[in-house]
Image: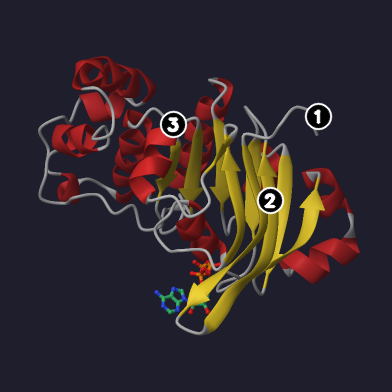
C-alpha cells in the first residue's frame, strides 16, 4: 500500500435504517489510481456503505475524508462536486430519455462548457454509445445500459468511481465485456471501488480487496492472499 494520503479514507463509519444498525464501524481506504474490490454476501451492507459515503444517507458516526477534504455528513451534491461518483446498483438510468440526455444529466455539477468535451471522452471510451446517441436508454440491452450508467458517471469528472454490482444481471459474455471496460478505466489512472458478487473476476482486476460481513470489514489485503488461503476463501467467500 502507498504511504501517501489515501484518496478516500473511511474510518469508524456507522449507519443504518431507523434503529437498525447496518454499518458497525467500517474502515476502508482507496489510494489514488487503485482498483479496490469490496466483496461480501447479500445484505452485508455494501450498498449501504456506498450510500452513506456518498451522502445519500446520513452516517451515525465515523468520518469520510476524500482528496484531503472532510466529507463526513456532506450533502450528496458536495460529494459529487468533490469527484466521488457512484454508479448505483441497478444502473438507474432514465429509460425515457435518450443516451445523450442521460449523459448530459451526469454533468449537472460541472461547467456546461466542458460538457461537449466530456461527452467526446465518454464516446472515445464507449464507441457503442456514440452510435446510439438518440436511442431511448430503456430500449438498450442490459450491457449497453450498464455502459451508459458508467458513461454518465464519467461525465461528472470522477476522481473515484464507485461501481455497485456492474455485472449484475448480465450474461457471461457481457460480464467479460464489463470487466474489460473496468480494465480500460483502470488504465486511465482512475481510482475505482468495485462492489461485486463476481468474486473471481473482481479479484483478478483489483489491487486490493476488502470483504464485508454483517456490517464490518472482516478482511483487508491483497487479492492473492484471499485467493490462496483455503481458510479465507471458505470463511469469507463461500468458495
Ligand atoms: N432502505 C432500506 N431500509 C431498511 N433496510 C434496508 C434498506 N436498504 C437496505 N436495508 C437493509 O440493510 C442491510 C444491508 O443491505 P445492503 O443493500 O447494504 O447490502 P449489500 O451488501 O449491498 O447486499 P447486496 O449484495 O444484496 O446488494 C440488509 O439487511 C437490508 O435489508
What is the secondary structure assignment of the residue under circle 2?
strand
The x, y position of residue 97, in whole percent, is: 11, 44
In the image, taking residue 234 as reference, residue 18 lies left or right, namely: left
Above or below, 206 relative to 230: above
The N terminus sits in image quarter: top right
Residue 150: where, in percent of width, then height? 37, 39
Horizontal side of residue 155 vs 221, given as left or right: left
Q: What's the residue at 44%, 31% (across, down)? A: 158
- Rendered position, 22 above or below 167: below
- Separation of marks 2 and 1 at Cα, in angstroms: 15 Å
CA gap, disc 2 and disc 3: 19 Å
| Contact? badges 2 and 3 (CB < 8 Å) | no
| Depth check, front residue: 63 or 48 | 63
Crowd rating for badge 2 (residues with CA inside 10 Å; few <14, some 14–19, many 20+): some
Mark 3 → mark 1, Cα distance in angstroms: 22 Å
Residue at numbered disc 1? 3
Determine the secondary structure under disc 1: loop
Residue 128 falls left or right of residue 218: left
Kindly indicate the quadrant of the structure image that contains residue 146: top left
- Residue 144 is left or right of residue 66, and the answer is left
Q: Establish if 53 lies above or below 129.
A: below
Image location (x, y in percent) of residue 236:
76, 67
Disc number at residue 158?
3
Which residue in the protein does label 2 denote? Answer: 28
Q: Identify the mark nearer the N-term, 2 or 3.
A: 2
Residue 194, can we see it? yes
Q: Residues within 10 Å of mark 3 (few under 14, many from 20)?
A: some
Of the pair 161 and 143, the residue shown nearer to us: 161
Amino acid at each position: 500500500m502507498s504511504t501517501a494520503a489515501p484518496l478516500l479514507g473511511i474510518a469508524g463509519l456507522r449507519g443504518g435504517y431507523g434503529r437498525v444498525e447496518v454499518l458497525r464501524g467500517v474502515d476502508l481506504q482507496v489510494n489514488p489510481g487503485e482498483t479496490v474490490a469490496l466483496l461480501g454476501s447479500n445484505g452485508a451492507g455494501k450498498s449501504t456503505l456506498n450510500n452513506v459515503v456518498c451522502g445519500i444517507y446520513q452516517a451515525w458516526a465515523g468520518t469520510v475524508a476524500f482528496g484531503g477534504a472532510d466529507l463526513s455528513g456532506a450533502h450528496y451534491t458536495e460529494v459529487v462536486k468533490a469527484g466521488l461518483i457512484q454508479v448505483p446498483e441497478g444502473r438507474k438510468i432514465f429509460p425515457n430519455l435518450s443516451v445523450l440526455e442521460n449523459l448530459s444529466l451526469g454533468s449537472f455539477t460541472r461547467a456546461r462548457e466542458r460538457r461537449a468535451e466530456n461527452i467526446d471522452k465518454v464516446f472515445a471510451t464507449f464507441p457503442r454509445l456514440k452510435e446510439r446517441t438518440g436511442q431511448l436508454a430503456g430500449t438498450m440491452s442490459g450491457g449497453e445500459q450498464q455502459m451508459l450508467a458508467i458513461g454518465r458517471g464519467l461525465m461528472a469528472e470522477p476522481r473515484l468511481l464507485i461501481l455497485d454490482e456492474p455485472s449484475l444481471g448480465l450474461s457471461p459474455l457481457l460480464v467479460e465485456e464489463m470487466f474489460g471496460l473496468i480494465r480500460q478505466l483502470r488504465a486511465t489512472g482512475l481510482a475505482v471501488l468495485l462492489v461485486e458478487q463476481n468474486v473471481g473476476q473482481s479479484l483478478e482486476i483489483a489491487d486490493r480487496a476488502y470483504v464485508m460481513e454483517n456490517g464490518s470489514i472482516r478482511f483487508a489485503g491483497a487479492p492473492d492472499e484471499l485467493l490462496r488461503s483455503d481458510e479465507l476463501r471458505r470463511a469469507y467467500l463461500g468458495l
